[in-house]
Each structure stands twice: as C-alpha cells, then as structure tokens.
Amino acid sequence: MLTFPADDLLRRGPAKKRGNYNCGRCGLPKKGHVCPSSPATPLPPRSDHRLRRALSFDEEVAETPVTPSPWETSGMITEDEEEMVEVGGGMSLPESCLAKVLRRLPPKQLMGAALVCRGWRECVRRVWISAEEIRIKVSQIRFVGSVLHKCDGLARLTLMMESDADSTVLACVAFSCPNLEYLEISLAKDAVNRITGDELGRFVAEKRSLLVLKVAECTNLGFLNINSTSLSTLWLSDLHCISRTVVHCPNLKELSLDFGRKTNDSTDLINMIDCLGRGCPSLKNIHIASVRLCNDAVRSLADANIRGLRMLSLVLGSRITDASVAAIIAGCTNLELLDLSGSSISDNGVGMICNAFPRTLSRLLLALCPNITSSGIQLATTQLPLLVLMDCGMSISGSSCEEQDPQDNTIEIDQRSIEIKKYQSFPVKKHKTMHQKLIIKHEHLKKLSLWGCSSLDALYLNCPELDDLNLNSCTNLHPEKLLLQCPNLMNVHASGCQDMLIGAIRNQVLNEFTAVENQFMLKRLADGSKRVQVPRFLSQATHEDEKMKRIRSTQCILHLDSN
C-alpha cells in the first residue's frame, strides 16, 4: 500500500470515494474483474464515471435491433417485465394501469399530470399517442395546437369553441391530425364562427381521410364549395345568404342544411337542391330546414332522381302543399322517414303518403301542419302498419293555413327532442273552436307526440308497444274521454294540462286511486237474460298474469315539468 505524507494529503484534498459498482457488460462486480465479453482491442476510457443505464450506447448495441418502447408493444410486455410507476404513499402501479386511469382525465388535467414526474410523463405520453377521440372546450386557439400535436393516431375530434372560430382552427387541425375522420365544431353562446366558404372548402379538399364534418353557426360562409371523395356525412347549421353552391361528393350519404330563421335570407334553394342532387347521387338522408322551402324546391329534388333516399326531412316550409307530396312520391320510392313539419299539406296529402309507402315508412313527423285533422292522423296509423313514431304536435290546434302569415313564422323546431318551448309565439289571427276525437289502434307504434293539440277533445289509444306519449299543453282534452290501453307505457309527458286530466292519467297508467279489481268474471246465461259472476278457477286468465300486468303498469313515469 502506498502512503502519502500529511502535506501531500492536504495538498491533494480528501480521498476520492468511488464505491462499489458493477460491470456494464456482464453485471458482475467490477473490482478485480476482467470481463470475458470485452473486445480484443480495449475501448477508450469513458469521460464520465456514472452508473451505466440498462440501455447501452456502445458500438455493440448499435449492431443489435432497437427494442420497441412500452407504449408501442403494450400487448407484448408481461406484468413482471412492465415498469412500475410511483403513485404516492409508497405505492406503485404498472404503466398500463396508470395510463388507463389517466385516460379518464380531461385534456387540461392530463397535461398537468405530465408535470408530476418522469414516470407520469411517460404514461401521459402513452395516453396521447393511443388517443383516438378527443372532446375539448377551447378558450384559446393555441391550446388546440398544444394538445393535437401529441396525438398521432387521433381519428375523432370534437371542439366546443368558447372563443371565435376562424381559419386558424382549421389550419391547426389540418396540420396536427393527418388521419382525422370525424370533426365537429360547435360554439358557445357568445362565440362567432368566422370561417368562410373558401376556407372550409380548402380544408375538406385537403383532408382526404375525412368522413364526417359537422360545423355550427355557419353564418359567414357566403358560398358553399365542397369537393371530397371520402366525405360521407355533412352537417351545416345556421346558414344564411348562400350565393353559390358547388358540391361534388359522390360518396356523401347524409346531408343536413339548417338555415337561420331570418326573413332576409336570399339563398336560392331551387338551384342549391338541384346541385346537391347532381353532385351527390349516393344520398340516403336529407334534412333541410328553411322558411324558403316551396313546391319548386321539392320538385327539383324529385327531378334529381335519388333512388337510394331513405330519410327525407323538409322542415319549416309553409309553402309546401300537397303538390310537393306528389313530387316526393314520384322521386322517392323507398322512404323510411318523412318529416314535413311546418308545411301546409292536408289530409289528402297524408292519404297520398299512406298509399305510396305502406311497406317502408316507419317514422312520420307532421308537426305544425294546421291543415291536418284527426281524420288524417287516424288514416296514417291505419294504413301504415310499420309505423313506430308519429309526431303531430300543434297540428290539431284549431288554426288554419289561411289564418297565418308565412312571413312571420318564428317557430323553432327541434327534431331530436320533438318539443317546442315557445310555440305560443305562432302568429294566429283567429282561433277556431273545434272538438276533434282521435282513435288510434296500432300494433307497432312506440312513440306518439300530440303536444299542443288544443282542439283534441277525446283520445282513445290501444297500442300494446307504445312506450312514450307526449300530451303537453293538450288543454281541451276531457278526462272522461281519455282511454289508454298501453301496457308497456314508460313515459307520459303532461305539462300544461288540467289537474283533472293529470289525475285521470295517473289513474290509468300508475294504478292510483283505483278500486280493487273484480276477482270474478261475468258470463251471460244460456237464455241471454243476464250475466252472472264465474269463479276464478273457471276463467282462462291466471292470477299471476294479471299480477305481472299490474307490475308492468306501475313502471310508467309521469313528467309534469315544463322543460
């Protein structure tokens, strides 16, 4: 052992303590060890003496294939080989388990979780890479860029814009999401959509993988220029003053164009619908809501000869009459849904619909059609055996088409909720007091909406499959003339009805205030003179069957709120 004088020790400083360490090649203790796997020519000494990492960067490693990262081969790594991540309290979880937990966080909280430690950051990165769908609220556009550039496999994106939307949003999405298939942009109450038709058309043309596009508040488009071979669904709402329309989407299946309720709209719907029919031959579902809909626009749709059309919705067209029904029948032969809410068709038009689609039509919506009476509704339920949904709200309301100004139509229709909150604003100069009776017997009808039918005096329903009934604001419906024979009824809406009518509904669907059922059947004597009670053991129905019927009837919910 070599010794040093005290002066030399002071000059040299304290002795260097390296400690024990292992060989970076074979893992054995390094002290007094000659590695058998060392190359023939010794490698130059390393400039640092830190502990070696598991993955070496020497020349030997460069010759071997690189091991995939855990997030790339999560299905190949066993639980013993997977790296553990500390979660606090002296506990740890595998990376895959922590990633599943972090996947439930919103994007902002997920970005904050990446700042905890390196293990969490790797898990968050794994979540971003594997994300296929993101729904976020956007207050600043730069936040969109900071999130989307981490998601290489993103396919579905929903943006709720709390600030104004412009071309920057589309540019950020186009750059960060090369494989995007679904894009939906909605706006908060005070936000404005400033995207123009040129910018939207350029975005759709560049995104060749885009299948679904839904954009709200499209008031500044100016013109519509959509060309795409991949687009299958297009929803544009709050359109206004579209000067020109050029749409060429051969694979488009569903189209929804919702125009604003402004009277100064100058959109030429006839040329627009003609362009849609020629440029989109594969259309199956069409929804157009505009106060400018008329018979000529419907004829242009019929002339397009879209034979594959299954669902047609032409809403708020007060100038649509029975002539439009004839055009629809001539151009569409296999309709499954027909929505002519807000039109001026009559019972004759309903009869034409029943004669044309008895084997295909399953959903018929005729709300806000003042020329339709209870006779037309009964005709539809009688001649359409496949009908499962029927909406005739505000149709039996005692007002006629001649008594209203089509230019003052301010009604808003929400097809999804099938409810209009402000229907009282419908301009009517004079009301007719007409007491109408409605009798419906149908084997497959499941949803029936009669909201706002103020002229309805009596209602008799025998629908074993009916599960949803809307009687909101049926103010003149008499409790004594209400009969509901619907054993599977689950929801009854009765807001705005009289208290006695609500009591009658409770009595029939909830079995409240009812007397005990008679335990004996009645049978007429042989001479036909009178009927006598027959003991239970002679009857066909069993006590268990009636008990199950009573149990099912008590599951119905009565909705009395006005929302």
Image: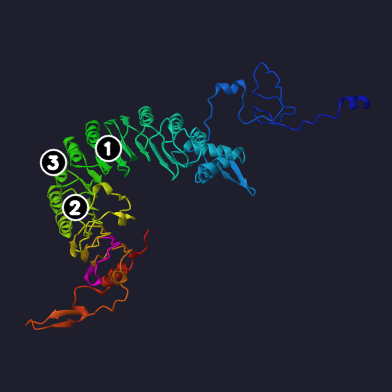
Q: Residue furthest front?
A: 429
Mark sitting on residue 349: none
Which circle's residue, 3 or 2, is located before the other in the chain?
A: 3
Q: Is residue 84 left or right of residue 270?
A: right
What residue lies at 64% left-to-right and 23% top-to-bottom?
37
Q: Residues within 10 Å of mark 3 (few under 14, many from 20)?
A: some
Q: Is residue 98 above or below residue 282?
A: below
**Residue 38: percent from left, percent from top:** 65, 22
Question: Which amino acid type corresponds to the residue marked 2 in the rendered image?
Answer: Glu
Q: Amino acid at mark 3?
A: Ala
Pick the quarter of the image with the C terminus. Answer: bottom left
Dot 2 or dot 1: first in sequence order is: 1
- Residue count near mark 2 (Cα–Cα under 10 Å), binned few <14, some 14–19, many ≥20: few
Number of labelled discs? 3
Position of 133 with respect to 105 (left or right) is: left
The x, y position of residue 316, in whole percent, is: 26, 47
